[in-house]
Amino acid sequence: MLTMRRRDFLRLSVLASSSSLISRHSFAAPDSAPAARLTIDPRHPGNRIGPDFTGLSYETAQLGEPDFFSPANTELVALVRRLGRSGVLRIGGNTSEFSRWTPDAAAAMGTEPAAAAAPVGPDTGKHPPTPTIITPHAIRNLHGFIEATGWKLIYGLNMGTGSAETAAEEAAYVINTLGPKIIAFQLCNEPDIFSRNGIRKPGYNYSDFAQEWRRFYEVIRQKVPNAPFAGPDTAFNNEWLAPFAKEFKDDIVFLSQHYYAEGPPTNPSTTIDRLLRPSPRLKAEFEGMQETRSEFGLPFRLAETNSCYGGGKQGVSDTFASALWGAELMYQLAQAGGEGINFHGGGYGWYTPIAGTREKGFAARPIYYGMLLFEQAGAGQLLESALDYAQETPLLTAYSLRSENGSIKTAIFNKHLDRNIRIAVNPGERAAVATALRLAAPGIDAVSNVTLGAAAVDANGKWKAAHEEHLPVDNNSAIIDLPAGSAVLVSFGSR
């Protein structure tokens, strides 16, 4: 991959802002000159986005309701499948360290939490979770759910409060049930903060963790010789990545780490404005993962991520801003060489992409639409692009790719909240037509009425664009007006 300045290497995503939003903004006259120019260079490809890049993450405690992840939960199946015909579901989170596997379903009767059907949202980390009973029935249903969606699975095992022998029994049942649908087991969740959350004593360090990890790995591999693993699944600690990769490079299929843009939710500086601005911490985390990949040849994945740790922040994590942030994060990760991403959620958590329960039904939250934009662009090869636009802070960004059908697509994010921008986009090759899909909402802080292509996703996961714009093409450039706080996916074609 070519190394370029941030403003010179641009990225793709699927974005929008709908005609109803455009009508509320005053644009320059139709013949006014564009304020920005984006030039794509198809001769210089970047990293590849695979078909299973997209992912979701749920707490292990959700398995305490065995019928949640089930093919019979048709609404959830449809909403997951709408995000891609292939993808990765991750089961883990803080509650994975408090799960209890039992192979005896009869013995588990009456021991499950009384509110087993209650929504299980992201764990806030404020107190130890209630232990979750995991039964063969839950795993068999999980297998049916995975088959129905066409996705694959990352499965977390309890190294925090469990035994290696029990983890081996659980892993054996899971892999015997799901087979090649399992892409990796994770032995713990955020071990770099074990000494803070009470799972381990103060002073717990990487050396202690590595010794434990090796013991669990060896016991599980004795029982399940073909079990795949990933790690270290740290919260943020880049200092653990390189030693883990060096020590376990022959034992894992990819490196995993977490990332939360903001937090805690009580911090008054956790705002929409800050969420949409470039993050030095994200840049540092990606650089650490890139260096480790370069040195040890291991792919990496953000196995858990979202806008604000501690369960998210109302008025930020549940707003339209999260759709712009989430879609761009997916392309930032792809540009950095990441293999995929898993947005954490569940229940009615503020940042969950899919909210709801089996009893009350499900709905797509704003961030879901950012993921849907990414899905509409699809897999493909990122392309080098150059953006000519004067700005002190890069709040106008773009990501371009050649999709698997050969067409060039570019996603442009206008994260300015106070200016509309006219942009000329040159695909770098002859194009006769250009179309656009816009992501729209009543405002950047809207929590509902989000649409893509002027259409919403229904409870059954059905979506079809109601409005696809045809853009004027002049001198091989498509001209598009992009309102403040919005995004658009532009697709080029020969006719």
Image: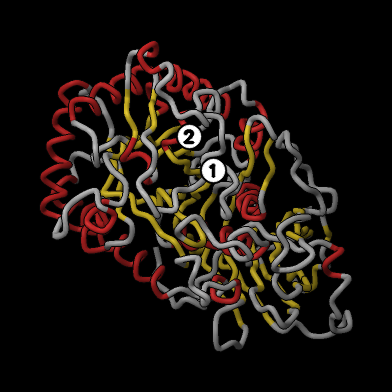
Amino acid of disc 1: Gly
Q: Is residue 261 left or right of residue 94?
A: right
Front residue of 385/465: it is: 465
Residue at the (57%, 42%) spot, across then down? 347
In-front residue for pair 213/59: 59
Q: Tag 2: residue type?
A: Gln
Whether residue 196 sits left or right of residue 123 in the image: it is: left
- Tell me the residue at 66%/73% (across/down): 414
Indicate the quadrant containing the N terminus: top left, top right, bottom left or bottom right: bottom left
Label 2: element kind:
helix
Marks 2,1: beta carbons within 8 A: yes
* Snapshot quadrant of residue 285: bottom left
First along the sequence among labels 2 and 1:
2
| Residue at image location 61% in from the left, 30% down from the top | 77
Would you name the residue on which mark 1 appears?
346
Q: Is residue 400 visible?
A: no
Q: Is residue 49 above or below residue 29?
A: above
The residues bearing labels 2 and 1 have C-alpha atoms spaced at a distance of 8 Å
Residue 62 is tagged as 2
Residue 213 in the image: x percent, y percent?
A: 17, 42
Q: Position of residue 208 (x, y in %)?
A: 12, 50
For this view, does 353 lie left or right of residue 88? right
Question: Where 283 sits versus 320, above or below?
Answer: below
Q: Residue at x 68, y 46 (%)?
A: 364
Q: Secondary structure at mark 1?
A: loop
What percent of the width, then of the height, locates residue 48? 47, 52
Foreground pick, 356 / 184: 356
